[in-house]
């Protein structure tokens, strides 16, 4: 398995060497990336080709994962929220909503067999969780950056396709990926700290990672979780 780093995410791909004229790339239904190329093509050239198509690859992977997630929203399935796994219960109702108990999440559905409705309810669940939690974490992680940010940054929450977050230091703005609501607090905070560090270093230099390690010592473990390595 080969891999490259692209926009703070790792793209892994299987490389098949065979007699083909061009470098070919496809994303399979399970999200796996497969690249085929001639034995004469250097690995550096292949990696550059993958990076040039990085946005398209990540977009395809996220779409595949979303589609697979939608298919798994069935009775007895697992719904993840803030790092915890809940049993999914489906019940028919006159309106579409959800209810969270200690170990279960119940989806109330006007059509219990409609996968789009189920996906929309899950999306609403993530939106509501993010809207409550993310602003608190932005404030909680702010103190070490008082001298850099004149005020607590504004926050936007979006369903980003290829990033967990980004920073617009000139506008004093942080954007966080809605789907971080799936992960536990430590993982979400590591992304918040990551974006705060970009107010100081607008790159991923050694100084950037030294600063990140000082404010968030467990960022490497959290990064592995986000990259599905743990």
Image (cartoon, rainbow, N blue to C red):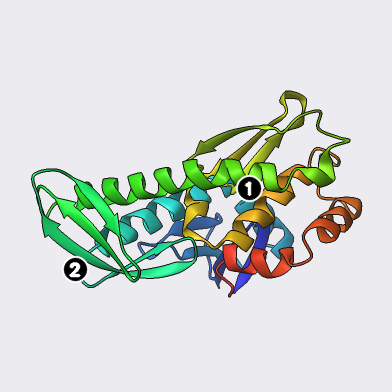
For the question of whether residue 193 can be seen, the reply is yes
Q: Quadrant of residue 152?
A: top right
Which mark, by number, is residue 113?
Answer: none
Q: Position of residue 62 (x, y in %)?
A: 44, 52
Residues 174 and 150: in front is: 150
Q: Quadrant of residue 127?
A: top left
For the question of whether residue 56 can be seen, the reply is no
| Mark 1 burial class by Cα count in 10 Å: few <14, some 14-19, many 20+ | some
Question: Alpha carbon of mark 2 to alpha carbon of mark 1: how far?
Answer: 33 Å
The answer to whether mark 2 and mark 1 are in CB contact below 8 A is: no
Which mark, by number, is residue 75?
Answer: 2
Q: Secondary structure at mark 1?
A: helix
Farthest residue toward the right? 207
Which quarter shows the N terminus? bottom right
| Residue at the image position 60 percent from the left and 55 percent from the top | 188
Taking the image as shown, residue 159 lies to the left or right of residue 167, namely left
- Say if 16 sits above or below 201 in the image: below
Taking the image as shown, residue 140 lies to the left or right of residue 30, namely right
Taking the image as shown, residue 77 lies to the left or right of residue 137, namely left
Q: Secondary structure at mark 2?
A: loop
| Residue at the image position 46 percent from the left and 65 percent from the top | 32
Sooner in the amino-acid sequence: mark 2 or mark 1: 2
Q: Position of residue 56 (x, y in %)?
A: 51, 45
- Say if 15 sits above or below 95 in the image: below
Q: Which residue is mark 1?
A: 137
| Mark 2 burial class by Cα count in 10 Å: few <14, some 14-19, many 20+ | some
Nearer the observer: mark 2 or 1; the answer is: 1
| Residue at the image position 61 percent from the left and 61 percent from the top | 187
Q: Position of residue 30 (x, y in %)?
A: 38, 65
């Amino acid at each position: 398995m080969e891999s490259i780093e692209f926009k703070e995410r790792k793209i892994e791909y299987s490389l098949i060497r065979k007699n083909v004229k061009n470098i070919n790339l496809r994303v399979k239904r399970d999200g796996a990336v497969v690249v085929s190329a001639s034995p004469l093509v250097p690995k550096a050239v292949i990696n550059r080709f993958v990076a040039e198509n990085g946005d398209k690859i990540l977009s395809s992977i996220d779409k595949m994962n979303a589609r697979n997630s939608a298919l798994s929203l069935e009775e007895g399935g697992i719904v993840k929220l803030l790092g915890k796994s809940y049993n999914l219960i489906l019940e028919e109702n006159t309106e579409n909503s959800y209810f969270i108990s200690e170990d279960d999440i119940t989806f109330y559905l006007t059509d219990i067999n409609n996968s789009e409705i189920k996906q929309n309810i899950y999306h609403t669940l993530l939106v509501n969780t993010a809207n409550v939690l993310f602003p608190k974490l932005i404030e909680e992680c702010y103190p070490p950056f008082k001298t850099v940010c004149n005020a607590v940054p504004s926050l936007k929450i979006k369903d980003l396709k290829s990033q967990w977050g980004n920073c617009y230091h000139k506008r004093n703005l942080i954007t966080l990926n809605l789907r971080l609501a799936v992960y536990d607090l430590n993982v979400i905070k590591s992304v918040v700290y990551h974006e705060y560090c970009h107010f100081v270093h607008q790159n991923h230099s050694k100084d950037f990672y030294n600063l990140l390690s000082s404010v968030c010592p467990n960022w490497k473990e959290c990064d592995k979780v986000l990259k599905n390595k743990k």
